Amino acid sequence: MIAPGSTIGILGGGQLGRMLAMAAAQLGYRCHIYAPERESIAAEVSAKFTCADWHDHAALSAFAQDCAVVTYEFENVPVAPLAAIPAELLAPGTRALEVAQDRLSEKRFVEDLGGRPAPYAAVDADDELQAAVERVGVPGILKTRRDGYDGKGQWRLASASEAAGVRVPADGLVYEALVRFEAEFSVILVRGRDGAVRFWDSPHNVHAGGILASSTVPAPAIVGQQVPAARKLAQAIAEALGYVGVLTVEFFATAQGPVFNEMAPRVHNSGHWTIEGALTSQFENHVRAICGLPLGDTATLFPAIAMTNLIGEAAGDAAALLADPHVHLHLYGKGEAREGRKMGHVTRLG
Ligand code: AMP
């Protein structure tokens, strides 16, 4: 067990790190944030901050020496430089990052475990694109294998001719069929160092322009019917990775059953409702898991919960948002309300 009072290292300096650090503080831990950006909203609520490049070996090893355990709030941390941190300090391990950072290896990994992603084809070079589009069909979505998030690095193709002239980047693309889904949902689980697994209720997630707009609990009936199979896959992923901490797996609920979309080896935006809406939040249970403490109950506390992201200017009027007494407002302290930027969220209970 990593005792309260110890220092938890967090790689990444955004809002997920901020909410993790706040949960860690409640349990008496200190957090040390490592991020390349000078401004860090996670560092603002943490004991220490190392601002250094992801490839800075000396900075990473000095950071590791200060920490009893190191975790991530951002899944695209380059893996090779993490060799500067003793492997036994990292929770979850880097294998989870390697799988989740590459859409192709992620899909293959999940297929090997019996999961079903949307039909897809790998595209490694310009001259492979046309054949991939023909094989998978249209409409479809071209996605960069690496570094995509919040709908970035994605292009929808309505017809095969739209693929003409596309330049395939060095890391390659994946072309996948557009899934006709009834709803999107996520499985959020936590796995302890002893292998114990707990699931939160699966929220119904609505995206707008590739960015999560809202997560609501309970989800519609079709999601409820597909949660058992989705949980089985999510647990198999966690077990195959020897995973410790919170793991999120996103699915499409379709007439043919759950289709795997992607996984995040970390706490997730679709789990923010658990802060007020569940007996133990995803952030607290992540801290408990990585520190080897017993996991808290994940039961939902209210008959209906809706989490809405505040994107761009929407976060502007705190007093108006709080005029509803059932609303909890979370503002991340980001300076500039740029378009598409997650500034905060509100959770409405009951
Ligand atoms: P991603 O970053 O891959 O999760 O994509 C962001 C969002 O785009 C998803 O949550 C869906 O709303 C939509 N999307 C991505 N891939 C597909 C697909 N193959 N079929 C239908 N919608 C998709």
Image (cartoon, rainbow, N blue to C red):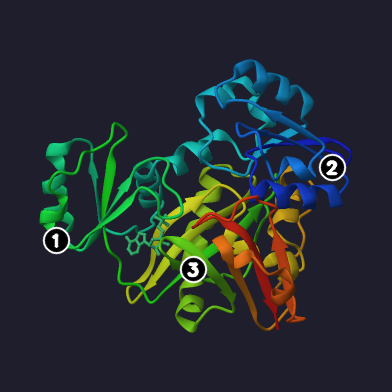
- Residue sitting at 77 percent across and 68 percent down? 279
Q: Quadrant of residue 329?
A: bottom right
Specify the quarter for ligand 1: bottom left
- Horizontal side of 324 relative to 172 (left or right) equals right
- Horizontal side of 91 relative to 102 (left or right) equals right
- Residue sitting at 33 percent across and 52 percent down? 154
Q: Amino acid at mark 2?
A: Tyr
Task: Kindly state the secondary structure of the residue where label 2 is placed.
Answer: loop
* Vertical side of 337 occupied by 82: above or below: above
* Vertical side of 303 occupied by 50: above or below: above
- Report the residue marked by disc 1: 159
**Which class describes the residues within 10 Å of circle 3: few (<14), some (14-19), or many (20+)?**
many
Task: Kindly state the secondary structure of the residue where label 1 is placed.
Answer: loop
Q: Look at the numbered disc 3 and say if its residue's Cβ is closer than 8 Å to ligand 1.
A: no
Does the rendering let one see residue 207? Answer: yes
Task: Kindly state the secondary structure of the residue where label 3 is placed.
Answer: strand
Per the model, the C-alpha gap separating discs 2 and 1 is 53 Å
Q: Quadrant of the C terminus?
A: bottom right
Q: Amino acid at mark 1?
A: Ser
* Vertical side of 305 occupied by 171: above or below: above
Q: Amino acid at mark 3?
A: Phe
- Report the residue marked by disc 2: 29
Mark 1 or mark 3: whose residue is earlier in sequence? 1
- Report the residue marked by disc 3: 185
